[in-house]
Amino acid sequence: MDILDQALEFEQRKMTFKTTSERIEASREVKRLILGVNEIYKQNKDAKLMDLMKRLTVIKQKIEKRLKGRLAA
């Protein structure tokens, strides 16, 4: 499975991360996916790839916001 398929699968996945460790793991995975898609984007400058990276970034921000909220409390 290539990086684009993994990114699309991650985007469609249900986002219920019950534990902090699941959130950390998801955050790391989505970061890896974003960086992988970015490498492909650098080569062919496809606007669809940029849109995918933006959608993944929104998911990553939501996960990290939840992480930081729990850690600060």
Image: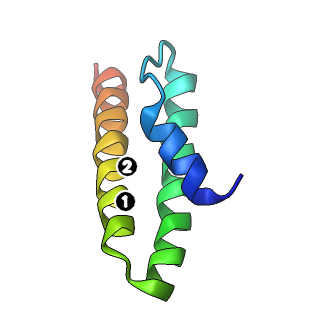
Residue at figure coordinates x 50%, y 87% from the top left: 43
Q: Where 67 falls versus 46 (above or below)?
A: above
Give the residue type at disc 2: Leu
Q: CA distance from mark 2 to mark 1?
A: 5 Å
Taking the view exactly as shown, the residue that stands out farthest to the bottom is 43
Residue on which disc 2 sits: 56
Residue at figure coordinates x 34%, y 66% from the top left: 48
Q: Position of residue 6 (x, y in %)?
A: 59, 48
Asked whether disc 2 touches disc 1, contact meaning CB atoms under 8 Å apart, the reply is yes
Q: Position of residue 53 (x, y in %)?
A: 37, 59
Taking the view exactly as shown, the residue that stands out farthest to the top is 18
Residue at figure coordinates x 37%, y 49% from the top left: 56
Of the pair 73 and 8, the residue shown nearer to us: 8
Give the total number of marks visible in the rendering: 2
Give the residue type at disc 1: Met
Q: Position of residue 40 (x, y in %)?
A: 53, 76
Q: Taking 46 as reference, is 25 left or right?
A: right
Please name the colour scheme applied to the rendered image. Answer: rainbow
Q: Position of residue 31 (x, y in %)?
A: 49, 53
The local crowd at label 1, few if under 14, some if 14 to 19, many if 20 or more residues have their Cα within 10 Å, is many
Q: Where 33 falls versus 24 (above or below)?
A: below
| Quadrant location, the C terminus | top left
Q: Secondary structure at mark 2?
A: helix
The local crowd at label 2, few if under 14, some if 14 to 19, many if 20 or more residues have their Cα within 10 Å, is many
Residue on which disc 1 sits: 53
Residue at figure coordinates x 29%, y 35% from the top left: 62
Taking the view exactly as shown, the residue that stands out farthest to the right is 1
Q: Secondary structure at mark 1?
A: helix
Q: Taking 56 as reference, is 13 left or right?
A: right
Q: Where 52 falls versus 42 (above or below)?
A: above
Q: Where 35 falls versus 12 (above or below)?
A: below
Q: Taking 72 as reference, is 6 left or right?
A: right
